[in-house]
Amino acid sequence: MVLRNIFLGACFASLLAGCSSDEPIHAGGNSQSASVTIAAGVDEGTRVSFTTDTEGVERLKVAWESTDALFAVVAGSANTGNFTVSQIQSDAHKANFTGAFGTAPTQSSEVNACVKTASSTVSGTNMTFDWSVQTGVASDLGKYDILTGNGGYEPSGTSPIHMHFNHYMSFLKATVTLPVAVAAHTATVTLKGTGLPTSVVWSGNTNTFADLKTGNITLTAAPVSGTEVTVYAALYPGTVRELCADVIVGGTTYSNLLVTHSATLEAGKLYTVSRNASSIEDMTLWIPDAAWSKVIDCKNYKIADVMREPEKGSDWLNVSSDGTRVTISATANTTGAPRQATLSFTNGSSTTKVDITQMEDKDFAGTWDMTAFKAFYTTGDATITGVGTGIHDNTWSAIGTTPGDGAADNIVKEGVDYGNKQEMEIAYQSGGSSITGIYQAGTHRQNLSMRGLYENLRTKGSAEVDYSRKSANVYFFIDTNQSNSKNQRLYTGTYAGQYANLMPEFYNTTTSTHWDFQYAWTGGSGYWWYRGDVTVVGHTTKVSWYANRVNGYQNLSGNLRVVGLQVMRYTGTVPSANYIIREPENLGSPKANWGAYAITYQGDIVMKRTADGYKEITIGGDN
């Protein structure tokens, strides 16, 4: 069969080389006296063509083989014949085929012939070629080639019908790059492209082609070496666009691996594609709410597949490619909440992951759910008797909540019902004054106001986003009033008319090995503050104030560590022992120096919120 053997290498002569000898090689054949001979010649072809990406020296070498056969049709008739090789010349570019038609052609009849291949079937005067399944091996390309010729029939003497056969298929050698190296030696490759031809019908009457069908081409035995799969395929001439490959190797499927963006293929030529496996580095960015884009110069980078996490509502993060540059972009964040998304895209050989968190300090305004490891609180109305140290709450009680699963490590866990969910409302104020903490270094801008810890107590706070460090923090200022008076008046709720202040709950490492309630107040001109670390996943933002030893205490001074937040109640504007509402002394030993709390959040404290329009989250058992 013509092209049964195709040799690829730098050592072969030009495809235009002529015959080196006329000495025949006999290969048997038809010896009938009424037989017809077709003298078939093929050029070895022009020099192999290459794509603009690569220049190489491989050539096609064409040879007739003793098993080749022709199907011939007398033009304009139903008269057909089959011909087999009777003689091959030494350079294998010329051969005689002998056979017979159903009826003898008339003088000067035009005869059209086509080389029969394993991928062809005959029906009447037509031959259908189907190359949708190939081996993908270089030496088998001839099985899928189409060669046709025509000539005039002259019955006088023994003159053969002289025909010159031309190629009607082009040939592709492509290197497909896998994301990882594999140990297998062969792979099954499915070529996919826009309008990729898979079969055609040759008309013996007119020597023309029709009924071109398109689809995928499967290569069953493509060679593999490390991360490279070498593909040889016979393709119908024309322009191939967005040619990709699905590769199954070692039981794993790699999808949409790029072969070439576009290639115009000519018949009889071999095109070698060694694609530039360009790659883009992963990136993690924190950006403000304004629309954002980043352009990366990356020639020949085709985006084959894009994945987003989370799947819902992450289309604000996009990627596109024009073949020269890759553009990653984010739309403006108008949700009123922080958001995060991960975009993964591949060019067929490498995958790039882009993780973007988009937020500003104003995005912390909204309703939050808050919980702590434990919560303690007083109940009932305050009965104020006496003055100074005699101010007691006679209905004081130590009611508290603990995790439903009996956890004892003081860490807030997802899925644990803490039974002490609290709703927090955060308002945002642009700008704000700078405040310096005296026990923890740093100056912070007061731009938040938080309500929900207790009655109508409003707690000052700060949200800060550091885009260069890819981090954000939220701070509670323990000095709720930020003035000499310190305490805030409660205007609504059970304790309206009293005053309250937010204070740290201390743990004293020198006097106790457990959580130790200690009443304290600020005072002076300095401000305490309590820092929470911010994480954003998808549309949910979490602020965590760690109190357990593993995650790190909020260290203040000496042996004291902040392990929670508590609200203290007073009868006046000054956070003094003379005005604090205490636990009554008759509950045990005298506690004149002990302060009664309104509520204490102890252990790790977590606040969460989810942007409107997405699944609402709650703290505790519903997580």
Image: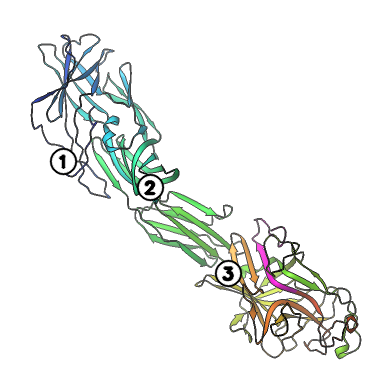
Identify the mark nearer the N-term, 3 or 2: 2
| Cα–Cα span, label 3 and label 1 | 67 Å
Question: Which residue is drawn at the image coordinates 23% and 20% (left, top)?
Answer: 112
Question: Which is in the foreground here, disc 3 or disc 2?
Answer: 2
Q: Which residue is mark 1?
A: 12
Quadrant where the image shows the C terminus: bottom right
Hey, what amino acid is under mark 2? Ala
The answer to the question of whether label 3 and label 1 lie on touching residues, with beta carbons closer than 8 A, is no
Q: Which residues are magenta?
A: 601-623
| 245 on left or right of 438 | left
| 300 on left or right of 101 | right
Q: Which residue is mark 3?
A: 360
Question: Which is in the foreground here, disc 3 or disc 1?
Answer: 1
Do we see residue 551 in this rendering? yes
Q: Residue 333: percent from the left, percent from the top?
A: 57, 62
| 467 on left or right of 499 | left
Secondary structure beneath label 1: loop
In this view, 474 is above or below 536: below
